[in-house]
Amino acid sequence: MAETRQQETPARQLDRLSEALVSGTQHQVRHLLKNLTAAEIGDLLESLPPAKRLAVWEMTDPEIDGDVLVEVNDEVRASLIRDTAPEDLVAAVDDLDLDDLADIFDDLPDTVISEVLRSLDRQDRERLEYVLSYPEDSAGGLMDPDVLTIRPDVSLDVVLRYLRLRGELPEVFDLLFVVDRQGHYLGSLRLADLLTGDPSSQVTDLMDTSLKPIPVDMHDSQVAMEFERHDLVSAPVTDSGNVLLGRITVDDVVDVIREDAEHSVLTMVGLDEEDDMFAPVVQSARRRWIWLGVNLVTALLAALVLYAFEPTLDQLVATAVLFPIVMSMGGIAGTQTLTLMVRGMATGQVSARNTTALLRKELLVGLLNGVVFSIIVATIAILWYDDLPLGLVMAAAILLNLLAGALAGALVPVVLRRMSIDPALAGGVVLTTVTDVIGIIAFIGLATFLLLGR
C-alpha cells in the first residue's frame, strides 16, 4: 500500500481528495491525508479553491500543521493563518525546528509570536533571533542553529555515550562538527566513522578537515551549488571568524532549488511564485496589469515602426504575409540565447571574464543559423510568389534578425544585471521589442527600397 502511494502523482492525489470532498465523507478525507507527507498536503492545499482548502486544512492532523504551514507559499500560508485560532497556531509551530520557525515567524500574528517566544527557553530564543537577523535568502537564513558539536581530544566511545545520553538526534544527520573550546570550526566526523571506528580512537585522528564551512552571508543559490558540487548532505555554517553558527541540510537546499526554478519560470511572464493561484479575480488581474502594460508599450513601439512602412504594406501584400516569419525567427533565436545566458548567470557559469567569448560564439551561431534558414525561407518565398527579389529580401531580413536576436539575447541580461534588474523578469520583453523592431526595419525597410523601385 505504501509503495502504491509513493507512485501516485500529485494530480491523482488531487483527484482522489476532490472526489472525497464532493462525496462529503470526512473519514475518507482524513484517511487520505494521513498517508501524505506535510509537503504533499501543502501542494494539495495550494491546488484547491479557498472553500475546499479550508475544509481540508481543518481535517489535517494537528501534529503536522506547523510543517504544512512551512511548505505552502506565502499567500496560502497567510490565508490558513487567518482561519486558524491563535491557540491552535501556537500548538502547530511549537515543535518546529528553529530554522523552519524562522521561515514563517513574520507571518504569524503578534499574539501568537508573543506566546511562541514565551514558550522557548533562553537559548532557543537567542538562536531564533540570531537566525532572523540574517536575510532569508542567505546561508544564515537557511541554517539550523541547533547543531551537535564535539571536541577533537575525546574518544569515539565518549562521543557515543554523549549521543546516547542526548537521546534525540536531528532528522538529517550524517556529520558531527568538531570545534575547539572557543567554538571555532575544525572539521567534521562522519557518522559512519563514528559507528565503525575503534571506540578508543580519538576524534582528531578520524575527523575530516577537507569539508570547508559555508560563510553565513553566502547567497542561498550559491549554497545550493556548493551542495551539488560536493554531494553534501549537510554542511557547517560559520561567521567571518570561523566560529560555528549552525548547519544547513540537503532538505533545505532542495527547497531552494525548487523555489529558484519556480521563480525563473514565473518571473519571465511577470508572475510571483508566492501568489495564490486561487486568489480573487480582481486581485489576480491587478497583479498582471503592470506586465501587460509593459508589453503593450513595447507592442505599440513595434506597431509605430510598422506604421511608418504602411505604404509598402499597401503596395506589396506579400510583405504583410511574410514579415511575421522574420519576427518570429528572430524572437526564437534570441530567446534561446537569452535563456542560456540567464541560466549561466544563475549557476555562476557566466561572468565578466567570459562574456565576450560567449557573445562571439553566439554571434557565430546566429550567423550560421541565419545563413541556413535564410536560404530555406528565401526558397519558399520564391516558389510561393515566383519573385526572386522578394526571396532575397526575405533572406537578408532573416539573416539580420537572427544576428540581432543572438546579440540582444547575449547583451540584454548582462546590461540588466548591471542595472540591478532581474534578467529573468525583464529580459524577455526587452528581447521581444528588439527583435520585433529590427525584424520590421530589416524586412519592410529592404522591401521599400528594393522592391517598390522596380
Image (tube, rainbow, N blue to C red):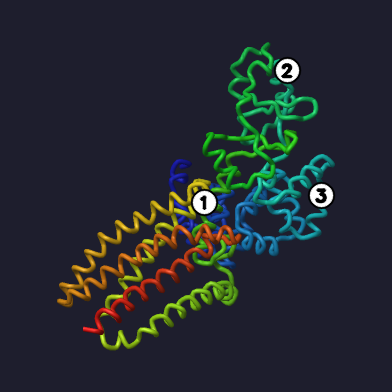
Label 2 near label 3: C-beta < 8 Å? no
**What kind of residue is marked 3?**
Leu
**Marks 3 and 2, Cα distance to the nearest angstrom?**
34 Å
Question: Marks 2 and 1: which is nearer the front?
Answer: 1
Question: Who is closer to the viewer here, 47 or 316?
Answer: 316
Q: Pointer 1: what residue?
A: 345
Q: How many marks?
A: 3
Checking the image for residue 158, the label placed there is 2
Residue 14 position, x and y percent, is: 48, 58
Mark 2 or mark 1: which comes first in sequence?
2
Residue 124 position, x and y percent, is: 79, 42
Mark 1 or mark 3: which comes first in sequence?
3
Q: For mark 3, give the secondary structure.
A: helix
User: Residue 91, relative to residue 272: is it above or below?
Assistant: above
Question: Who is closer to the viewer here, 14 or 159?
Answer: 159
Q: For mark 2, give the secondary structure.
A: helix
Mark 3 or mark 2: which comes first in sequence?
3
Q: Is residue 365 left or right of residue 422?
A: left
Q: Pointer 3: what residue?
A: 117
Q: Residues within 10 Å of mark 1 (few under 14, many from 20)?
A: some
**Marks 2 and 1, Cα distance to the nearest angstrom?**
47 Å
Q: Quadrant of residue 401?
A: bottom left
Q: Quadrant of the C terminus?
A: bottom left
Question: Who is closer to the viewer here, 417 or 286?
Answer: 417
User: Residue 333, relative to residue 317: is it above or below?
Assistant: above
**Marks 1 and 3, Cα distance to the nearest angstrom?**
40 Å
